[in-house]
Amino acid sequence: MEMLWFWLVSVMVAIYAVMDGFDFGAGVLHLWVARTEAERREVLAAIGPLWDGNEVWLLAAGGAMFLAFPRLLAAGFSGFYLAMFMVVWTLILRGIAIEFRSHVRDTMWRAFWDVVFAGASVLLPILLGAALGNVVRGVPLDASGYFQIPLFTDFSAGNPVGILDWYTVLMGVLVLATLTAHGALFLAWKTEGVLHLRCRHAAVALWPAVAVLALAATWATAAVNPAVYRNLPHAPLAWVGMALFLGGLAAVAAGLKGERYLMAFLGSGGFIIGILAATAACVWPVMLPSTLDPAASLTAHNASAAAGGLRAGMVWWFIGFPIALAYFSGLFWIHRGKVRGPEEGGGY
Amino acid sequence: MGDLLFWHRLQFGFTSTFHYIFPQLTMGLALVIVVLKGLALARGDERYATAARFWIRIFGLSFAVGVVTGIPLEFQFGTNWARFSSHAGGVIGQTLGMEGMFAFFLESTFLGLLVWGERRLGPRRHFLAALALFLGSWLSGYFIIATNAFMQHPVGYLVAVDGSLQLADFWVFLLNPWALVQYLHNMMGAVVTGAFAVAAVGAFWTLRGSHLEQAALNLKTGVTIGLLASLLVAFPTGDQMGKRVARHQQPTLAAMEGRWNSGPYAELNLIGQPNVEGRKLDNPVRLPGLLSFIAYGSFSSNVRGLGEFPRDQWPTNLEFLYYGFHIMVGLGTLFIALMGLSALFLAWGRLERTRPLLWALMLAFPFPFIANSAGWVVAEFGRQPWLVYGLMRTAEGTSHLVHPGQTVFTSLGFAGLYFVLGLLFLFLVSREIEHGPVAH
């Protein structure tokens, strides 16, 4: 039961990364790829109807983690106290920027919100990447099941650890590059003309960097937390994840070469899911390792709620999840094809 | 430690009160929009569709701020109330998780269609989008109320070996009788907010002499729904809520009424100042016997006073609770009077010419926000000193390792950010009201 919930939460986190990832990427790129007001509105029209729902995956994943692993949520959120509020405030600014922008027809108003949107879109992947880095590297959990961690120490990734060190910053950069490249493919798929060409250029330039960074991160993880790879031989799902990750990379390359952007976009989605799945399979059952004492790590077994709640949650999860997928399929279907710049006053 | 508890409470109190300004407006307006779209469809009357279009724009703004100010609350369970989350997450994680899965996805999917999709969808499907959004936002309200109801009146749980609370019976927990009453009371409060906003905008346009046709329609809609909701929020929902408190939270009832001595024929205190040190209510204006009747249905029922309970079971911040309750009830009574009077003038066909009444309707719109906030003050301060009533004290639920300075820092951050957010919201809403409704 705990294993199933471990994977359900992982699946939701992965969906969140792929879905909100492309609108983060679009936000990072839009100042550069969309230079006129019409182009900006085209970018916003591509992500406008979807971004809000994409972000719900974060809340849904958080809710699933809350009900299944309350001790993990309690320790993690309070331990990363200040960093959590940075994420929250950035999410607020980003949401406001995209929603308020269209309400006033004024170039300075819009230029201001465009920069806020871009800035928040750059900051969030770095923060989330650093969070992933912390979860893999470990935090100073002790027997009480709680911890506090400073924002940074000596950047060495050894005790005493800080939220930001060379490893977590590397992960932040990897996630930023990956989601930017992912967003470039989404925009290349959904747009035409100059905008499309600029997105294609961005994708072509970014993907080799992503591959190099992913390789570096794989090596760095071995240096920071060698225990992760000890599981590898006995974790078949890790091999599936790695196949997905390499297959995704191949699909991106083939899609860019053959100008088949949906294929490339799906490939980058597979790449992201593959990395996360392989990571999840390797760390199982540890969800938050302790840098002080391996016995104090929070695992799917010692952090989970009682079986009754896990069973009840499972029932509604398997009802709710297909409904959520149906909404998204419907939305993508309604907004299928190349996006057209909406008329003024017609939204976004 | 005492400091830390204070700052955690202040921060959550501030962020949740500010957040709830927006959902109460969106949940109230969601019903108004469904009614307007329904009338437009049923009567084939384009004027109702125009009115709905205007309110959908306000709804969109309010929804956006509601979403971004709601996200911090989900995080704060973990960041500020870690020991509570760890202790009770096995139960309340259910409803918080379901809110994401069943309400948020529904809302986020149909919001775009409602706000931007009228032309593409056509009137019938656009009405269905409004209905879906109404369902989503009201469902979301239920999951939050059910979570709060567990903290007010825990049911369907068991205490595990490690002392934590775990789910025992899903349906008992989800259909907590407390939740059903609290939900209806809360939602009627939200409809009051929405209806007062609609009436206020109608009154403003009428006084200004602009958009007269739409102004009249908004007045009529706002006053009709406003009167119904003002009545329903008091009776039966408010009355039933009070009876639940009287049965299950007796120290809370005593504190709400500033009552220290027990006894039958308990009087209802209209005004007065609670004197905690002197253990009495100063300068009271009372209606004899009424509290016994309201709480238990008979004048001779005994209503226990605070004196009967040990001091450590009294609600903390007793004065705040007392005044919150009296402000809520006082305003609720005024709402019925104002909407009743307006409805009479509306029925006589004289509302649009009665300028003093229009001024009152226009200036009344902030007060439902105050009444709703005061109502939540009653619920949350009334629950003290418990975090989960009778099971866990508030002081036991904090993130004990977080330094108070961090909480002060983030509270100041929220104060600044929300000040700007509030200004932007008011600025954009005033622009919409100034601009007025747009016919297709």
Image (cartoon, coloured by chain):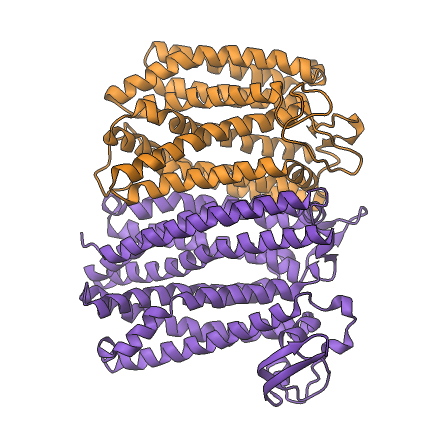
State the residue in front, A95 or B48: A95
Give the total number of marks visible in the rendering.
0
Q: Dividing the picture into quarters, in which one does residue B319 lie?
A: bottom right
What chain is colored purple? B
Q: Is residue B7 left or right of residue A178?
A: right
Against B297, residue B142 (above or below) is above
Query: Residue at 47% of width from left, 19% of height from top?
Result: A177
Query: Residue at 53% of width from left, 36% of height from top?
Result: A87
State the residue in front, A165 or A48: A165
State the residue in front, A311 or A238: A238
Figure colour of chain A:
orange
Q: Position of residue B121 (x, y in %)?
A: 26, 45
Query: Residue at 57% of width from left, 48% of height from top?
Result: B411
Residue B79 seen in the current view: no
Against B417, residue A18 (above or below) is above
State the residue in front, B68 or A230: B68
Q: Position of residue B75 (x, y in %)?
A: 58, 43
Q: Position of residue A54 (x, y in %)?
A: 45, 36
Q: Dividing the picture into quarters, in which one does residue B339 lie?
A: bottom left
Residue A71 seen in the current view: yes
Q: Position of residue B276 (x, y in %)?
A: 70, 74
